[in-house]
Image (cartoon, rainbow, N blue to C red):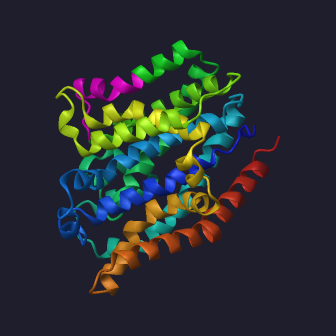
Amino acid sequence: MRPARARHLLALTGLRFLLALWVILHHLTGHGQSLEVAVLRLPYPVYTFIRGGYLAVTTFFALSGFVLARSYSATVWNPRSLLRYGLGRVARVYPVYVLSLAIVAPFIVADRAPAKAQLVAAHGLLIQGWLGPLSVNWNTPAWSLSCEMFFYLAFPLAAVALQGSGWARTLAAAAVACCLTRVLWTAGISDGIKPLVHFSDFLMGVAASCAYDLLTRRARPPAGGWLYLPAGAAAAALIAWPQVLPGAVDLNSALRPLNAALLVGFGLGGGMAARALSSRAVVYLGKSSYAMYILHVPVLWWYCRWSKEFSAPLYLTLVIGISALVYRFIEEPANRYLRSRIQVALQP
């Protein structure tokens, strides 16, 4: 089984860089962080938007569903293809994640937190996102990888259920994705059980891929700017002024269909923003965005230990530069090597 070689959607790869940068700015502007004072001087909507960088993670989840659905759209699922798919997903995320754990290992050893052994085991097995508040420890963004592993496990079922969907089934899946988190909360599922709560974001990405398929089958697909420009503007407005939402609608659920429109729009391409995100430099930074995302907190630990003065431009330069090198010399080679070994091991 080989993933379908769909047209590479460069603007979506470039978008990953902006999302990772937004997450980093969110962490640098939190309470007691180095940029907190500076960001508090900004107009309140701008401050709210920057502090909303945690919402980039839900866009990443939707993007993950979209890309998986594009990559495996032609897959015939059977025990062998399922095993190859699963091992390939682990090969995609685990090498750089192990590197992130190695970087923070001295701080983990020095930590005197209770039940540290169990927490270390949960981090090693990528199940920390099921542990509620305990999941945020040592490397804050790593909880999202436990969500991704759950999504990878569930994806073949979603792919089979939505394969060849028309507009009716696609819109039904999107409607389920919009409501699922609220239904889970009503059923008593804690917001701390992150893989279940955020599955709706991933499902929306799969539904968005179905919508993209349906639009591109038209003789004249619409220009993507008609989707990503209003969706991006509406999402930015909601993040900056979340108080406009009624009490029964949470911000993440309100953003979910806008994320879908954003992904489909950038997938269709067209317009200055899509061209900028598709440039060679931004696409390369997008490819290294996973390393940026999972390494920026470990780098921050060491930066703060070694330097008494914090320089945000220097720190961001370090994170981007280190991540680009990690992608070039560790992530991509490790991924290719592991996939080749999987291919050999699973040959009939």
Magenta segment includes 179:
yes
* Residue drawn 56% across the image and 53% down it: 277
Q: Position of residue 314 (x, y in %)?
A: 40, 79
Given residues 99 and 78, the one toward you in this image is: 99
Q: Residue at x 35, y 35 (%)?
A: 255
Q: As displayed, is residue 4 above or below residue 15?
A: above
Considering only vertical position in the picture, is 17 above or below 183? below
Residue located 33% across and 65% down the image? 138
- Residue 252 visible? The answer is yes
Q: Residue furthest right?
A: 348
Q: Quadrant of the N terminus?
A: top right
Name the residue at 44% across, 53% down: 19
x, y percent for residue 202: 46, 36
Q: Locate residue 320, reporting x and y percent.
A: 49, 70
Q: Is residue 244 left or right of residue 152?
A: left
Looking at the image, residue 169 sits to the left or right of residue 301; the answer is right
The quadrant holding residue 201 is top left
Whether residue 152 is situated above or below residue 120 in the rendered picture: above
Side (left or right) of 225 relative to 129 = right
Residue 299 in percent (x, y) is at: 40, 73
Q: Is residue 153 visible?
A: no
Q: Quadrant of residue 270?
A: top right
Q: Quadrant of the C terminus?
A: top right
State which region is magenta: 176-191
